[in-house]
Image (cartoon, rainbow, N blue to C red):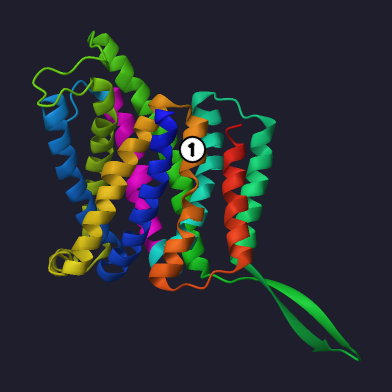
């Protein structure tokens, strides 16, 4: 039950971070926003590890652990979060989170490819249902009257969102699923490293200021490794793709509303949300955790209406629910 409660909290946490990320990224730009958010996250993670592991860095992690978690940070944070923030800017957080349901089929396919995990027949059904739900939300039908000797009505299906925004959102969902698989591989290597050192996961690490079992600190340590790659990647992209990257970053630091959004997005996203999502998979099955994580596109609908005054149709709500249901089928 503890893992399920954590998973539901993660879904709400990602809803909050999505809403603040939309505000902050629109004011700062996606790269400065991610760089600022990741810096804040690493400071908080270092403090958390110092209190719970006795050192402000991931103790006991070997080279293989660092390699796979850095790869996870490159795919999930640098590429995935960059695309996600660009998607928020163009199509908004509500639709951005809808496309994040693509992480489930991506994780299933890559888990099969890299970890030999079996894909049940229900996963194929889940893929179709997920894509159907997304299509229902983002496609619209309009009627045109043509005259060719007689009047006739023809229905045309079109994408009601920016194609560029959809591209970024799809990439974000795919990278989220890929990053999850790479994180799982990294966590497995972390366990091997701890076992090789003869360290008990139920024990409190030497030098820790809080009596917290090592098992509860490992997700935060893993998130820090991913975050290090994230920060380095965002700073590098900022220097490459922005003519005045440093100046843009300095101006962003003077925007109080943007900085407040960045802090709250960090708090509920890279710090609490991501770390607790890794912790949840330790206390419940990956399938149950991922199913509950996927509730975010439904949860975010009401706040989007109240805060951003967005008009939401019944078709979009139904599409979001169908997409979430499809994501859950991957883990039945």
Work out whether residue 181 can be spotted.
Answer: yes
Q: Which residue does the image show at 17% across and 70% down from the upper left? A: 255
Task: Give the camera-side residue of 101 and 111.
Answer: 101
Q: Position of residue 56 (x, y in %)?
A: 12, 32
Q: Which residue does the image show at 22% across and 48% down from the upper left? A: 231
Note whether 242 is above or below 39 in the view shown.
below
The answer to whether residue 321 is left or right of residue 266 is: right
The answer to whether residue 54 is left or right of residue 96 is: left
The residue under label 1 is 290
Work out whether residue 170 can be spotted.
Answer: no
Task: Give the camera-side residue of 191 and 305.
Answer: 305
Q: Residue furthest right?
A: 149
Mark 1 residue crowding within 10 angstroms, few (<14) / some (14–19) / many (20+): many
Q: Which quarter of the figure has residue 44?
A: top left
Q: Secondary structure at mark 1?
A: helix
Q: Which residue does the image show at 14% across and 68% down from the upper left? A: 247
State which quarter of the image contains the C terminus: top right
Q: Residue furthest top?
A: 198
Q: Which residues are magenta?
A: 64-86
Q: Position of residue 64 (x, y in %)?
A: 30, 24
The answer to whether residue 181 is left or right of residue 122 is: left
State which quarter of the image contains the N terminus: top left
The prevailing secondary structure element of the residues shown in magenta is helix
Q: Which quarter of the figure has residue 178?
A: top left
Q: Position of residue 68 (x, y in %)?
A: 34, 30
Q: Report if residue 197 lies within the magenta region.
A: no
């Amino acid at each position: 039950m503890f893992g399920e409660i954590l998973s539901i909290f993660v879904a709400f946490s990602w809803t909050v971070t999505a809403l603040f990320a939309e505000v902050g990224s629109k004011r700062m730009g996606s790269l400065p926003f991610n760089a600022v958010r990741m810096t804040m996250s690493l400071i908080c993670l270092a403090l958390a590890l110092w209190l719970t592991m006795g050192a402000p860095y991931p103790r006991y992690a070997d080279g293989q652990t660092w390699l796979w978690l850095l790869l996870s940070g490159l795919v999930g944070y640098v590429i995935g979060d960059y695309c996600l923030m660009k998607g928020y800017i163009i199509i908004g957080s509500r639709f951005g989170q809808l496309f994040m349901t693509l992480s489930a089929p991506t994780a299933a396919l890559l888990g099969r490819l890299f970890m030999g995990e079996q894909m049940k027949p229900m996963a194929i059904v889940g893929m179709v249902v997920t894509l159907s739900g997304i299509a229902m939300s983002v496609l619209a039908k309009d009627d045109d009257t043509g005259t060719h000797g007689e009047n006739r009505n023809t229905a045309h299906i079109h994408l009601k969102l920016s194609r560029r925004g959809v591209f970024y959102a799809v990439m974000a969902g795919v990278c989220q699923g890929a990053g999850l698989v790479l994180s799982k591989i990294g966590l497995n290597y972390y366990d091997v490293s701890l076992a090789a050192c003869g360290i008990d996961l139920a024990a409190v690490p030497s030098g820790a200021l809080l009596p917290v079992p090592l098992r509860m600190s490992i997700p935060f340590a893993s998130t820090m490794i991913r975050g290090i790659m994230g920060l380095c990647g965002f700073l590098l992209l900022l220097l490459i793709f922005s003519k005045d990257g440093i100046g843009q970053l300095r101006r962003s630091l003077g925007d109080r509303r943007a900085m407040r959004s960045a802090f709250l997005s960090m708090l509920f996203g890279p710090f609490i949300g991501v770390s607790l999502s890794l912790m949840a998979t330790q206390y419940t099955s990956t399938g149950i955790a991922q199913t509950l994580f996927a509730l975010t596109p439904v949860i975010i609908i009401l706040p989007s209406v109240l805060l951003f005054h967005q008009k939401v149709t019944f078709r979009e709500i139904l599409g979001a629910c169908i997409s979430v249901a499809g994501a859950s089928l991957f883990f039945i």
